[in-house]
Amino acid sequence: MSTPRELLDEVRGLRAQATAREDSLASAVAALPAAWRRSAANLAHYLALRARDHSALQAELVRNGLSSLSRREAHVMPTLDAVDRALSAMCGVAPEPARASMTIDDGAQLLARHASELLETPMPHMTRIVVTIPPWAAGDVAFMRSLVDAGMDVARINASHGDAAQWKVSIDALRTAAAAAGRRIPVCIDLAGPKVRTGVCADGPIPLVAGDVLTLHAADNTSVLATKRVAVRPREVVEHVKPGDRVLFDDGNIRARCTGVDRARGEATVEVEAVRTGAWPLKDRKGVNVPDTDMPIAALTDDDLVTLDFIAEHVDIVAMSFVRSASDIADLHRALAARTQRTIGVVAKVETPQACRALPGILLELMKSPPCGVMLARGDLGVEIGFEHLPEAQDEILALCEAAHVPVIWATQVLESMTEHGFPTRGEVTDAADAARADAIMLGIGPFMVDTVRFVEDLLARTQVRRARSRALLGKWQPLGEA
């Protein structure tokens, strides 16, 4: 058991480490808009706090009736200053001068302000409801009005579906409906990004079981049943996959591993290790995840650049898919600046292990051109890191973003059963209530969308009072994928 003097020394050491981390990022912080510099400094302080495990210190602080330092992501230095003052009084010594540039209240206020700048002010709770607009609803003002009345706060369009003409009709109908309701509903478009997919099955779906061997190629876009040759686009997958790398098809329903490569022939061999329910056919244009493979693929594709032309004129927020590094965000900022002087919010979709590891740098890059946010894209992220790691990844992403005062959109399969069939599962309701820790919840498409929006609206109203996104114990932060 530590004495108050020993605890004071340890806390002062933490304050010094936090200051040193801020100093090391001084040039990056100085490059940000003035309104975001305190947020960047707080992120630096949080990264210093998470540089090693502090769970033992937390227990000792609690034994002395002091803050455990948990749930303090949004205001790290003010908390350390307060603990220093309390411990100094217990030891009968003078406290060190305060180092914080903000108060404890400022952290929560900054996050709330940044969320409102990106997603508008929510009604009536703090967590917004983002609703994906289905292609079949284009031009349907009455349907849009029903979503607005049910509680939609933000409308999302997936650029992987439809075209600019359809998107424009949807946006016009939405804005007509919102204006009639006396509301403003911002519009977000998700860029399609460099999605890796299989080709067209020339002879129909390819049945697969564990032990089957596939040959991946990029010679054309054709997959052949008889030879189990599977086309994969873009070709960088075949060019950079290595023996031992995991290769996951169809949202992880087919799990394989690379066993060999032939660079001269532009082919790779993979062996199927497991398939859903023992057998699962591989169909046309199914997604492929290669979480162990570093591919030099630009996050902004040629199709994305065309979509940006539309976004520059008609949209409030753009979400970037398959972000891997801060440079991807810098590329998007440059592309937007070349097209418009309008303020367009940028959201980084975190759905790869690389994005998890690079998240602090991604956050600093986002801050250069606010408003900004992060989307917790749990579908691809769960496939890439393994669903068993998804809960801890969610917590860490929420914590880092709160430290940076960057709002988070909790996405993918929220209340999917209710949206599609009218009834939620128990697990989905628990998941949706957990999502109230984020700044927005994103819902998908289905025949019961309006009912689902109403359900979430009611759920948030009852759970919002318990909204607390932070983890209780401050173990050493270790991004997923690092040994």
Image (spheres, grey):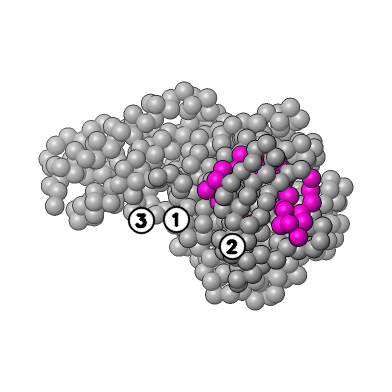
Q: CA distance from mark 2 to mark 1?
A: 32 Å
Choose the circle earlier in sequence order: 2 or 1: 2
Examine the rendering and report whether any part of residue 128 can be seen: no
Q: Nearer the viewer, mark 2 or mark 1?
A: 2
Q: Quadrant of residue 93?
A: top left
Name the residue that disc number 3 marks. 472
Residue 224 shown in magenta:
yes
Name the residue that disc number 1 marks. 392
Q: Position of residue 58 (x, y in %)?
A: 26, 51
Q: Quadrant of residue 76?
A: top left
- What's drawn in magenta, residue-wise? 220-248
Quarter of the figure with the C terminus: top left
Q: CA distance from mark 2 to mark 3?
A: 43 Å
Name the residue that disc number 2 marks. 211
Q: Position of residue 348 (x, y in %)?
A: 60, 43
Q: Residues within 10 Å of mark 2 (few under 14, many from 20)?
A: few
